[in-house]
Amino acid sequence: MLTRLKVSGFKNLVEVDVRFGPFTCIAGANGVGKSNLLDAISFLSALADRPLVDAALSVRDAGAHSGDIRSLFHRVGGRYGSEMSFEAEMIVPREGLDDLGQKAEAKITFLRYVLALRYRETDDPGLSGGLELLKEELSHIKIGDARRQLAFPHKPSWRNSVITGARRGGYFISTEGEGEALHIKVHQDGGAGRPRLLSAPNLPRTALSAATAAESPTATLARREMQSWRLLQLEPSSLREPDPFTAPARLQPNGAHLPATLYRLAKQNGAGTEAQKAEHAAQIYCDVANRLSELIEDVREVRIDRDEKREILTLTVSGRDGTSYPARALSDGTLRFLALTVLELDPNFGGLLCLEEPENGIHPERIPAMLKLLQDIVTDPDEPVGPNNPLRQAIINTHSPAVVGQVPESSLLSAELKESVRDGRRFRHLTFSCLPDTWRAENGCPVISIGRLLAYLNPMAPAGYSELARSTSQAARSRRVMDRPDLQLNLW
């Protein structure tokens, strides 16, 4: 779980400092660059898994035409900066496996990761430059500081279920020296033994991305956590595709393998009699159908048809009149809603989910159903984390007033461009602000003016609470933006 992120020098993010709770909604006009924060998160995730250059090229629009990764750096006029930095505070899993299938157990689960990169020129003018590590650190955050560092409202039972362990001493990963003598040090978790010394100018990837359970289990689990930060870009064409029997049973970021994933959920109860297995499968399909009926009233059944002759799995939805519709006949919004429903039910899904404009393809009257689903996916900070309350998190962005008006007020971040001056040159960069009297404001987040928010929300037809906007989770029971008394007199 990503609890705080500082970014500077990445695209139009300059000295950005954002705290996150289980659910965050970033709102702003088109073109301000609100997607850049999600791109920064995706970049960090890629750096925990791939070489530096490969991670840079995986970011949207990075060198799309020329292959020049310099486009990731902040630009003022025609001049690019040469350095970027990140600082991420996160809660990591207590246990997990490394790439070799070896078990890793974290010494402590509340960590801070710091990374600084520099653009490196090449001698060949026909080739794009590369990236060079300037700093990499992984350290622990004291359990005694957890209550203050986790600024969002939560109960001690939740905090105690996710933040465990103890650590004496310094870093898991540290940096020393400078220039050609700059080294990244990977320390053993137990503190004994000599740290592994890596020459930073020659590193093709971060030290974290090469962590193993044998040497540094805590760093390994930090890597696993960052790898779980996913940007979902659900493509209707991928969601509509049937799956062969041999397809991976895990939903991909573009929505591929939806039928195989749902089929696996229905069949994964391997214990019990055949009747019990059939009952489990029927319950899974029923749960999906019930959730989908919140979006589309005319839904009786959702199932996976297994074609033994062609060896394919097809997702099918049946209406109340018995008419069946395969995935290829469903609307884009329905397919995206189905994909998120499957993620909610999947016990193997964890980590951070980033999603852009979840309202796409959804009728305005059904937006509360989408928001309720997203908030039901994430962890409930009022209950201990466990099988029925997995450690999940969601960050969405939107430019829809209908979404902004109905999200919990404490979840809202407004993205705007601000003009600043550096070295005598004016430039615009992305800033984030929140509503007054929320936990974000109490922890130093700049406050958006009510007048600016009113201009964003109007016009909006008044509406009472919908039952679909209610949930058993504390996050979804929170007062919506549009229900604030300081907005009510001016909004309608």
Image (cartoon, rainbow, N blue to C red):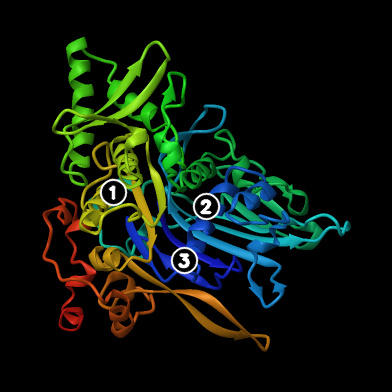
Determine if residue 459 is in view. Answer: yes
In depth, the one of 246 and 219 nearer the eye is: 246
Residue 415 position within the rendered picture, expressed as x and y whole percent measured from the top left: 42, 72
Question: Residue 34: which numbered mark, if any?
Answer: 3
Front disc: 3 or 2: 3
The three-letter amino acid code for the residue at tag 2 is Ser
First along the sequence among labels 2 and 1: 2
| SS of the residue under disc 1 | loop
Q: What's the residue at 58%, 42% (across, down)?
A: 49
Q: What's the residue at 29%, 29% (across, down)?
A: 316
| SS of the residue under disc 3 | loop
Q: What's the residue at 76%, 63% (across, down)?
A: 178
In depth, the one of 109 and 477 nearer the eye is: 477
- Labelled pair 3, 2 in contact (Cβ < 8 Å): no
Front disc: 2 or 1: 2
Residue 350 position within the rendered picture, expressed as x and y whole percent measured from the top left: 38, 41
Question: Residue 42: which numbered mark, if any?
Answer: 2
